[in-house]
Amino acid sequence: MSIETTIGDPNLYQSFKDLKFVEVSEGVSGALEIPIIRPEDNTLQGLHTKIEDKLGKTHWWLMDYWREKGLPGEQFVFKAGELEIEVFNFHTPLTPSELAAFQKAVGIFANVSGSLKHRTFLIDDLQAVNVHSGEDLNGENDPNAPIIKIQPNARRDIPHRIAEVGNFPGTLIHEGAHSLADEKFKEGWGKQFGWSLHLDAPIRHPNGHVQYDIAAEPARCITEYARFNRDEDFAESFLASIIAPERLDPERLAFLQRRFDVLTARSFNGAVDVIKRSGNEVVLPRIPETVLFYRREPKAYIRTAPPPVQ
Ligand SMILES: [Zn+2]
């Protein structure tokens, strides 16, 4: 009997069964923190469930969503200087112009690679809806995994919201931009451009979306979409600073050029190398088989002062 491996064989994904969970003491480097909240968390089964849940949220190839699709048909590795971006394609093969768009986007991100958190793009074959606009989604940024998901709509031959660029290259740069902004940066951006949270008086959009983060001067945002919240304002402005700087609010442009001073150079000067693998050559990522973890017990109640003595 021969065992055949097909391209869609989901067994080629790393599975939880391949992993060994080893408990260590708190502070061991690289160990997962497992908070013990309920008594059942403290059983062997409870601990394993919590570890798997944590790993499943932070490693895309351990997520059922992707595993059930089988192996991606194509894999690309883009290298520009220090930056390496990996792309797994679960949809139709990339066209030469999409490949060129990826190279260009990677060249742009090579200039800001120090702060780029998301280095994996997954090209999905299923379309989802954007919660802000109610329209078909172009891309999505999962901060935990961390991955950037590109939707079929991004590949349609339609203009991007910022009309100077196509929908596909525009989406790549917009989604990549989200991964440049950490919480501190977003806070600074919000303060600088008059964003504030209105928990008592949100904007209710016709599609049911409720918007709490509101700009004081929405007219200064580059697109309607940039008015949804400070994150979108930043991502849209970042893209505009590259492809339509003359249309961007001058203060936003100056802020971005100060923060990402290399933006003024527009693009990476070196070569962007591409490695392509397809079919059985696709190599999925794996984590080491031994997963270290420690339990974090809930903090015990500590009396701040001894009871009075009479
Ligand atoms: Zn966005």
Image (spheres, rainbow, N blue to C red):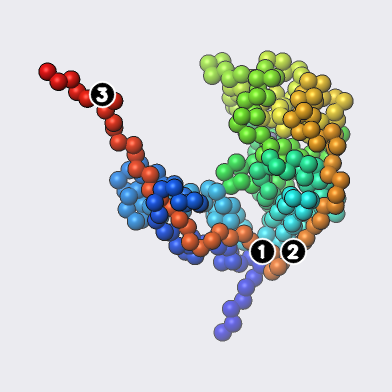
Residue depth check, mark 3 versus mark 2: number of the one nearer the observer:
3
- For marks 3 and 2, the one nearer the N-term is 2
Tag of residue 305: 3
Q: At x 75% / y 40%, what residue is drawn?
A: 112
User: Is residue 29 visible from the viewing direction of this image?
Assistant: yes
Name above or below for residue 48 compared with residue 251: below
Q: CA distance from mark 3 to mark 1?
A: 59 Å
Please give the residue where the numbered disc 1 appears in the rendered image. 283
- Residue 215 image position (x, y, % from top left): 67, 18
Amino acid type at circle 3 is Ala
- Residue 143 image position (x, y, % from top left): 60, 41
Please give the residue where the numbered disc 2 appears in the rendered image. 277
* Contact flag, marks 2 and 1 (Cβ < 8 Å): yes
* Contact flag, marks 3 and 2 (Cβ < 8 Å): no
Tell me the quadrant of the picture where the N terminus can be found.
Answer: bottom right
- Residue 184 image position (x, y, % from top left): 61, 29
Q: At x 77% / y 61%, what residue is drawn?
A: 276
SS at circle 2: strand
Residue depth check, mark 3 versus mark 1: number of the one nearer the observer:
3
* Residue 305 appears left or right of 180: left
Amino acid type at circle 2 is Arg
Q: How many marks?
A: 3
* Contact flag, marks 3 and 1 (Cβ < 8 Å): no
